[in-house]
Image (tube, rainbow, N blue to C red):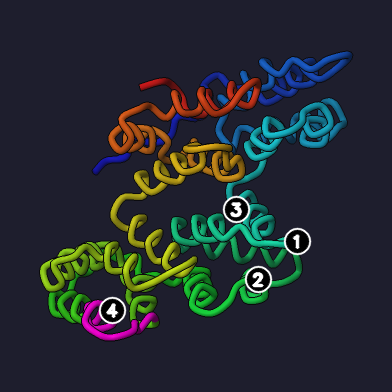
Amino acid sequence: MASKGGTVKAASGFSASEDAQKLRKAMKGIGTDEDAIIEVLAHRSTAQRQEIKIAYKSTIGRDLVEDLKSELGGNFEKVIVGLMTPRVLYDVLELRRAMKGAGTDEGCLIEILASRTNDEIRRIGENYQLQFGRSLEEDICSDTSSMFRRVLVSLSTGNRDEGSHLDDALVRQDAQDLYEAGEKQWGTDEVKFLSILCVRNRNHLLHTFDEYRRISKKDIEQSIESEMSGHFEDALLAVVKCMRNKPAYFAERLYKSMKGLGTDDDTLIRVMVSRSEIDMMDIRAEFKKLYGKSLCSFIKGDTSGDYKKVLLELCGGDD
């Protein structure tokens, strides 16, 4: 399945210093021209935004992100500052936010650690250590417990096999082991699930899921739902969903952030910002397929003002 890619692309005929001047003009004097800020920042790649940041400092002598923070507010500010943050650092800051203070945003921890590549996870780990002077694993261990902690620690090593090698005998063995660890016995061997789902390559797991269905007459997701509970269940389901279809996983995250009363703005912002350059076109297509309505129509119904405007730009059209 070829990816259609992101909705945000690098702008052609780009001039960092011209953009820096446009942004300065939008913020100087009384009142702020939010439309001008959206026009520039929602239509540049992450790399281009970093160039604008440098140009802003060298030609105007001020820090662009600090200026944006002092001019903007609320969720609109969170989106714009998110767009100005390099991708790995953005994940690092979101993980930290999820664990800081009272309460934990388990959904954020699961989403980032279950969906990023080994390389991204290793870079997140290195940057986390640099930013906060302690390891991501330390913070996960002090903030979570039991099997949920163990699955996050396993994912945070960035040690999944990323090849596509397939060994039919091992596929059959893993499917049988999962069956015996869950459906077949009284009580569940959670470690067996963890050691297979967090380590094997995607191709292997997709074949294992098919074999599992043949043996148990159930989808692996159904078994996880009936055998596991709480955040451990959520984490394993996220791993399975990311293996099967990552854009569909993010479409579901967006749907859940907006359905019903109230909006989970943290999740909505994080997915829109972090996926806009990667696979937002695919996420949009999966959203329509799963929920029968466009992602843009959900955003329109659930947000307002400049916050809505910038999310619609990142969504990139209404199909």
Q: Position of residue 170 (x, y in %)?
A: 19, 79
Q: Amino acid at mark 3?
A: Asp
Q: Determine the CA span between mark 1 and mark 4.
A: 36 Å
Tell me whether circle 4 and circle 3 mark residues in contact (CB < 8 Å).
no
Question: Which quadrant of the figure has residue 242?
Answer: bottom left
Q: Determine the CA span between mark 4 and mark 2.
A: 27 Å
Span colored in magenta: 177-190
Tell me, for residue 143, which label it has, or none: 2
Label 2 environment density (alpha carbons within 10 Å; few <14, some 14–19, many ≥20): some
Tell me, for residue 91, which label it has, or none: 3
Tell me whether circle 1 and circle 4 mark residues in contact (CB < 8 Å).
no
Q: Position of residue 96 (x, y in %)?
A: 68, 59
Numbered circles on residues, count: 4
Label 3 environment density (alpha carbons within 10 Å; few <14, some 14–19, many ≥20): many
Q: Position of residue 169 (x, y in %)?
A: 13, 79
**SS assignment at label 3:** helix
